[in-house]
Image (spheres, rainbow, N blue to C red):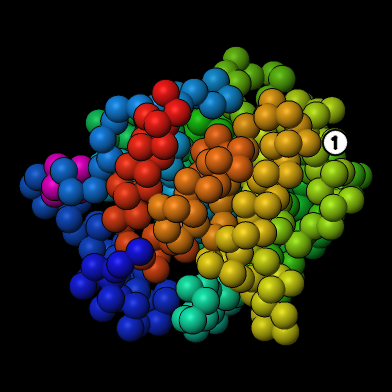
Amino acid sequence: MRRSVFQNILWLLPAEVAHNIRMALLGIVGKIPSGKWWLETVHAPQKENLEREVFGIHFRNPIGIGAGFDPNGDRLDELAATGFGFVEIGSVVPRPQPGTPRPRIKRLRPNHSLIDNSGYPSRGLEYILNNVRHRTDYTRDLVIGCNIGRLTASHRDDTIKEYLRVFRNMYQYVDFFVINISCNTASKRFVPRSREEILALIEPLFEFRRGQLDYRPILLKISPDLSKEELDTVIDILIETPLDGIEAVAGSIDMARKSPGAVTGGLLTERAIEMVRYIAEKTEYNYPIIGSGGMMTPEDVKRMMEAGASLVSLNTGLRENGLRLLKKSAKKIAETKNKED
């Protein structure tokens, strides 16, 4: 996919600096009169043949923003105007944390990939709550997901309480939850793999949800480094519990080898698509899957949907190739669907 002149300029800068510039410019455009109208006109995909109903929620299109792109929900208005089908904020943690020292995101230029060692920088639960409590005309119909992670400095035994605290406080303000069981971009990694560890984390969330008037879907976000047996365990949990779906996949520790952090982007493409296809086939396409990881081009997005993803969430592809990826990917999906019809 050819980059724009602006994207080529950003590509010369360190990855995190480039992303921060993009997000700052989005904020400036959003404050200009008619700025959001301009974002919608330039970037938003055509609406026909793209709508989806997934886990009981209406999505205007299946292409969303993955966690980490707008972690604190600072640009929800602008991203809604740009035309994304959903935005996944987070990872949301109970208290502010700075993440690891900069530079913490490294480009692997020949492979169109990143090594993310950011450690989940966040302004914390209270700050994010203020951003999602009051929806505007632009975000009123935007589907917002909340990715829940853990504080990197916390003791492992406190993780269940941390996840439950975020879940309770965000419950009435977002549309679905993604429980991150692949917190792998910090020195203190948290990747529960056994049935007992995973159930201990999600069962308190199911219990809280049972007492609520509104139903919020709960998904697990999993690591691409799971073995076949570990992935089968996750699938068994999906089938046997009130879990609503899976997001596959997060970054890969294994691909980073001896470097700290996790690999995202082009190196992850085939593994991410392979895992989505395996989960879809194993569950006979009966459970929603959000495909994430490795989608750098419209063709990657199309292949992910064909593998069995109900929705896709973009992050590294947008960072490296720009917001044009949304419109081009939506067009590719619509063309494919039109041919099938």
Question: Is residue 37 on the magenta stretch?
Answer: yes
Let me know if residue 150 appears in the view: no
Q: For this rendering, which residue is in front, 171 or 240?
A: 240
Question: Is residue 194 on the magenta stretch?
Answer: no
Element type at mark 1:
helix
- Left or right: where 43 falls relative to 288: left
The amino acid on which the numbered mark 1 sits, given as a three-letter code, is: Asp
Tag 1 residue: 236
For the point 76% across and 62% down, which residue is it?
225
Q: For this rendering, which residue is in front, 341 or 233?
A: 341
Q: How many marks?
A: 1
Quick check: 314 above or below 101? above
Q: Quadrant of the N terminus?
A: bottom left
Instruction: Say which quarter of the image contains residue 48.
Output: top left
Instruction: Say which quarter of the image contains residue 63.
Output: top left
Q: Residue furthest front?
A: 339
Coordinates of residue 18 in the picture (x, y in percent) = 34, 74
Coordinates of residue 125 in the picture (x, y in percent) = 53, 49
Dot 1 crowding, Cα within 10 Å, few <14, some 14–19, many 20+:
some
Quick check: 163 above or below 109? above
For the point 33% across and 83% down, which residue is it?
12
Give the magenta part as a residue range: 35-40
What secondary structure is the magenta-colored segment mainly?
Answer: helix
Q: For this rendering, which residue is in front, 307 or 196?
A: 307
- Left or right: where 261 falls relative to 341: right
